[in-house]
Amino acid sequence: MTINHSGSAYPHVNISEMETRHLRHRLEIEITWLSRQMQDLQGADESLDISLLQTYREMIFSRRALLGRIPR
C-alpha cells in the first residue's frame, strides 16, 4: 500500500457524509437481505445447496468487511 503525502496509509477519498451514511445504510440492508436468504435456504425442506450457502456467506463477509472500513 502506498503512503500519501499526509502520512496516511489510506488514499484520501472525497466522499460527503451523506454519501457515506447512504453507503453504510445500503450495505446494512444488503447484509440483512443476504442473511435472510441464507436462513431461508438452510430452513428449506429440499436438499441444501452448499454452493449457494457458501456464496451467501462470502457476500455477507465482504459487505461486513467493507462496512467496517467506512468511517462512522
Image (tube, rainbow, N blue to C red):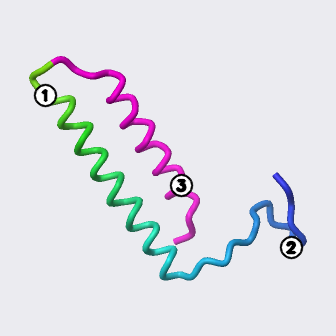
| Figure quadrant of residue 30 | bottom left
Q: At 40% from the left edge and 33% from the top edge, which residue is drawn?
A: 55
| Figure quadrant of residue 69 | bottom right
Vertical side of 14 occupied by 37: above or below: above
Stretch in magenta: 47-72
Residue located farthest toward the top when viewing the structure as drawn: 47
- 51 inside magenta stretch: yes
Considering depth in this image, is 2 or 46 the residue closer to the camera? 46
Q: Nearer the viewer, mark 2 or mark 1?
A: 1
Instruction: Specify which label sits upstream in the sequence, 2 or 1.
Output: 2
| Figure quadrant of residue 50 | top left
Q: Which mark is residue 44?
A: 1
Give x and y (percent) for residue 40: 17, 37
Instruction: Specify which label sits upstream in the sequence, 2 or 3.
Output: 2
Instruction: Specify which label sits upstream in the sequence, 1 or 3.
Output: 1
Q: Is residue 62 left or right of residue 27?
A: right
Give x and y (percent) for residue 57: 39, 36
Q: Residues within 10 Å of mark 1 (few under 14, many from 20)?
A: few
- Amino acid under label 3? Leu
Give the CA distance from mark 2 to mark 3. 23 Å
At mark 2, the secondary structure is: loop
Q: Which residue is mark 2?
A: 6
Q: At 50% from the left edge and 45% from the top edge, which residue is drawn?
A: 62
Give the CA distance from mark 1 to mark 3. 30 Å
Q: Which mark is residue 66?
A: 3
Q: At 36% from the left edge and 37% from the top edge, which residue is drawn?
A: 56
- Amino acid under label 2? Ser
